[in-house]
Amino acid sequence: MPLGEITWLRKGACRSSDPELFFPLAPSPLQAARAKAVCAGCQVLAECRDYALRAGESEGIWGGMTPEERRRSRFPAGWRSPAAS
């Protein structure tokens, strides 16, 4: 991660949280909701979300988004064109 990316990380609301909250071995809706609650009050939420989307982070809660939410954001329904016949 470039040094410029680290700067905003130091301001993250998650900096003093247990990493297991954001990167659980067994994700659950309750765990995701708890992590998102931390993100909701974060002053660098937008920077975190932008980083995760740009970097293609495939694991963990970043910027208040689950991996599935990030995938849907990057590849919305119907983004592929039907194959030519």
Image: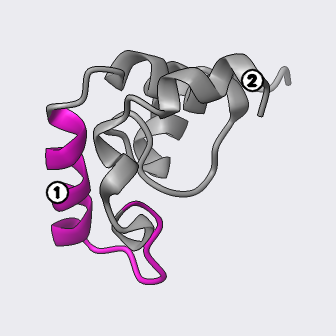
Question: Which callout, 1 or 2, points to the residue nearer the camera?
Answer: 2
Is disc 1 surrounded by few (<14), some (14 to 19) or many (20+) residues within 10 Å? some
Mark 1 residue type: Ala
Q: Secondary structure at mark 2?
A: helix
Taking the image as shown, residue 48 lies to the left or right of residue 18, namely right
> Residue 4 got which mark?
none
Quadrant including the N terminus: top right
Taking the image as shown, residue 84 lies to the left or right of residue 46, namely right
What is the span of residues highlighted in magenta in the rendered image? 22-40
Q: Secondary structure at mark 1?
A: helix
Q: Which residue is mark 1?
A: 33
Q: Which residue occupies the foreground of this view, 74 or 27? A: 27
Residue 76 appears in view: no
Report the residue at 37% width, 34% height from top: 12
Mark 2 residue type: Leu
Residue 67 coordinates in the image, percent (x, y): 49, 49
Q: Which residue is mark 2?
A: 3
Report the residue at 36% width, 68% height from top: 18
Is disc 2 surrounded by few (<14), some (14 to 19) or many (20+) residues within 10 Å? few
Residue 50 coordinates in the image, percent (x, y): 52, 19
Q: Earlier in the sequence, mark 1 or mark 2?
A: 2
Residue 40 appears in view: yes
